[in-house]
Structures are given as structure tokens and as C-alpha cells.
Amino acid sequence: MILMPRKAEAMRAGTPKDAGAGSPEIEIRDLHKSFGDNQVLRGIDLEVDAGEVVCVIGPSGSGKSTLLRCVNLLEEPTSGKVFVGGTEVTDLDVDIDAVRRRIGMVFQQFNLFPHLTATENLTLPQRRVLGRGKAEAAETAARNLERVGLAAKADAYPAQLSGGQQQRVAIARALAMGPEVMLFDEPTSALDPELVGDVLAVMRRLAQEGMTMMVVTHEMSFAREVADRVVFMDGGVIVEQGPPAQVVGDPQHERTRHFLNRILDPAAAEPEEPTGE
Amino acid sequence: MTSRLTKRQRRRLSQGIQYTVFLAALGVIGGLADWDTLQNQFFQTDLVKKLFPDIITIALRNTVVYTLSGFVFGLVLGLVIALMRLSSVAPYRWVAGIYIEIFRGLPALLIFIFVGVAVPLAFPGTEIPGGIYGKVALGLGLVAAAYMAETIRAGIQAVPKGQMEAARSLGFSHGRAMVSVIIPQAFRIVIPPLTNELVLLFKDSSLVLFLGVTLEERELTKYGRDLASQSANSTPILIAGLCYLLVTVPLSFVVRHLEARARRAR
């Protein structure tokens, strides 16, 4: 049952990573985050190279969403540093709005603006944040809706779209800003099972185009097939990471095995076993 | 026989009794009232004819103008106070909180007297711009702003947190996100309660008569009262009342319609 076709190495040829270019696109150093007494992240070190797709997996409460939200400072880290494209995000002097323009984020709950059509969801941030003209914003919006296969829904309001369509519009909205990095926070967790495939197909294509992606997900088949690297987190630390064939196919740690057993075959999993903490 | 009744029959019987009592009460009240005097006092047809068209072109028109000017001023001030109430700067929150408590806690009439008397005394030589219209906008607006601020604050807080996060993650500053994303959605939420506030203001505009107005500046209540005392007959009061209902009843329907639509949209 193992091994989906791995992404052809050739697809990566010519990207800065393969050229051996200098610093990583995302660099996280000794990141800690607490909410009151609750230590959610306890020292995370992680690098994501340009063009790399990293899937972060782990049980709920393991801190994976918080980690992702620290990258664009939706959560302020308690300590540690985060660099994106060479800029230190955690620097108190940094213009965080300018940094966020370079980082696309896709949320579990889509978070489309419900009072705007699909096209307007894409044009408003381009115009207000990037200062693009009407025509240019509209043209970019049309191109990106096309990219996620929703050109036909350009004038629909979010309430008129299915969850899967809303999520694809949300991806297009992020892409229209021309980001260097895309963060996905459980992008398919709020979707009906039959709608998951379309969203994953869009993400797969994005990965093939060489986008740098950090994806928090429970979709193991997606992780195995698309990720360059899988990171398993538990209890606020990275327990193990490596190529998907290794982490998902042949996990070295008991906690990883236990988590994968539960996720891949929920019925067979033994009840409760203390993990970390 | 009673114990033989099914539940449904008993419910029907109970409803029938209530209808009967209601109709009987109406009949008694109607029978006891002195209809001839009522018609004489409140609906003299020749007096009714004399009221038109001035009661519409002057009185109703002024009522509408007073209400709208107070509403617009109150809306702007209310939005500012709502944003202050939500500010991360504590003194703004305090000022907004104190404002709301004071102006919600005082009768509108007191505030009108205050605007009419205290303001000219406190700032001698200064005139509130816009004459009577400025004064009314100020008086009505000060009161309305306190209520509207709380409504707008609730509306802003009802916009899901993810909306702000999505806007911020796209690079919007907090202020721009408020203006472009949050406030437009908040206003959609608060349109029904704000329309309700408009109905209340429409009635409160009758307090203008405590500011002292010229003949041309009279609104419905003042106009009705003046003509009632001139003619020693209450017909103008009744007609003025009907003019209020002419506006408030349709507005209430609009509110109900908007509320129903908002429920469906969610």
C-alpha cells in the first residue's frame, strides 16, 4: 500500500534550492510560545528551502497551527526568531504588514470576505494593500481564479459557493498578492470529504510550480505524495522529520507510529496511550 | 363530558374562551365611550381640511429633516465612540464608556434643555452652526450616539475573528482592515437595530419644541399643539399622531423585513 509516485526530482530542477542558493526561505530558531501557563511551542528549529513543500503533522494540541501562525506573526512568539526570505519577522522594528504581503496564508475556515464577490475578494487586497490599479487588479484576479478552476464563479458571493470552492477562492486571493511563501493551516479540515480532492489538486499543482509551502494537514496521502519533507510534532516539539517515505512510511519514534496508526486506521488504534506532555 | 375531551379539544375550547373575552371587552369599551364627543373633539372634518397642506409641507417635513440630521450626526459620533470603546488605548475606552453611561442615563428632554440653555451660556457669543437645525442635530445626535455606539460596537464584535486575521495576513494594517473589511460587515449586521433607532429618533424629534422654534420651524407635535389650542379642539393632535404613524409603521415593517433577511443570510 506504500509509496505513491514521488514528485519527479526534475520538477525541482532550476529552483534556487537545487542551485544550492544561500539562506532558506523560512528559518525558525529556538521558537517558544506560551499562552499564559500553557507552553504550546517548546523550542522549534526548522528551515524550509525555497521551492520546498513541508507538511507538518501531529495530534491536535501539538502546536502545529501555532507554529504556522508564528511564521507570519498572527501569533507573537514568546521567544526565538523567525526569518522569511532573509527578513527577521520577529524583529520589533520590522514592518510586519510589508512582510505579510510576501506570505500567503490559507485558513481552515476559508475566511473569505462574505460581503464581497469572489473577484472582489481578490481585488480589494491588491488595491488597498499593494496599491494596484483597477484594471491590473481585475486582470490578476481573473488569472488567479482561472488558476484554481473557478473563472466561472467570478461574480458569486462566498455564501453561494461550496466549501471546496470557497477554499480555492481563498487560495487564489492569497496567490493574487504574489507571495513568496504559502502557509496552509489545515486547509481541508472543514470540508466535506467529497470536496477535499479539488482543493488538494490545486495545492499539488502549486507545489509542482515550485511554490514554497508549509502545510499543516491531516491528509497523509497528500503529505506522502506532495511533500518534500514531513515534520511530526507532538507536545510542542518536533519529534522527527524527514522524507515522507521515512516519516510516514517507516517512522522511527514510538509517538509517530502511534499517531499514524490512529490517523490511518482509527478503528484499529488502541485506546489512549500517554503521548509526550 | 369534560373528562371526555381530548387534548386538542381542550385547547380549542380554551382559545375560544379567550377570543370571546377579548371581543366582549372591546364591546364594553366601545359601548361606554362617548362617540359624539370624541368625533367633535378629535375628528372635526372641516378642521382636518384646514390642516392640509401645511401639516405635511411644514410640520412633517421639519420632523423628517430634524430626525435625519440628528441621525447622521449621531451615526458619525456613535461610530467614533464605538471605535474608542474597542480601542487598545485605555483612556479612549474610559471616555467612551463614560459618555455612553451619561447620555443613555439622562432623559433626552434634559439634554435638549441643556443644548438650548447651557451651551449658549457656557460659550457666550458662539452660535451653534445651522441655527435650529444645528441645535436639533446636536441634541438628538448626542443622545442617539450613545445608543448607536453600543449597537455598532456589538456589530463589530459580531464579525468573526477570522476576518481580521485574513485581512492582516494579506498585509492590511489594523486600521485599513477595520475600514475595508470589518466595518462594512458590521454595518450589515446593525442595519436593523439602527433603523429601530431611527424610529425612536423620529418620535424624540418632538422635543424640539423645548428649544423654541419659529412658525416655519415647527414640527408635528408643536404644530398639532398650537393648532389645537387655537381652535380649542384636539383634532390637530390626532392628525399629527396619524402623521407619525404614517412614517413609523412602514419603517417598522422595513426593520422586520431586514431582520428576517439577516436571519436567512446567516
Image (cartoon, coloured by chain):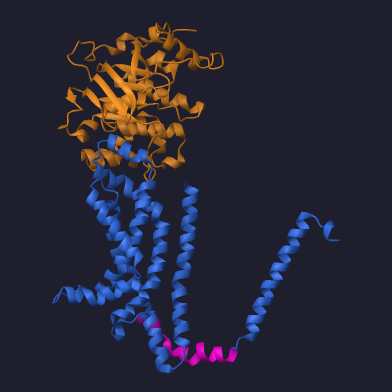
Chain colours: A orange, B blue
> Residue lying farthest right?
B1
Q: Is residue B37 magenta?
A: yes
Number of marks in the image? 0
Which residue appears at 31% of the width and 9% of the height? A9
**From what the image shows, is residue B229 above or below residue B253?**
below
Rendering quarter of residue A43:
top left
Look at the image and say whether residue B118 sits in the magenta stretch. Answer: no
Is residue A205 visible in the rendered structure shown here?
yes
- B109 or A64, which is in the foreground? B109
x and y percentages locating residue B28 in the rendered image: 66, 81
Q: Nearer the viewer, residue B37 or A19?
A: B37
Which residue is outermost to the front? A37
Residue sitting at x 47%, y 55%: B259
Looking at the image, can residue B53 be seen?
A: no
- The location of residue B197, given as percent across then percent down, is 39, 63
Q: Residue at x 63, y 86 (%)?
A: B32
Residue A124 vertical placement versus B215 (above, below): above
Q: Which residues are magenta?
A: B35-58
Overall secondary structure of the magenta section:
helix
Measuring from the top left, give residue B86's x and y in whole percent: 29, 49
Q: Is residue A75 left or right of residue B21?
A: left
Task: Point out the residue furthest to the left here.
Answer: B125
Which quadrant of the view contains residue A12?
top left
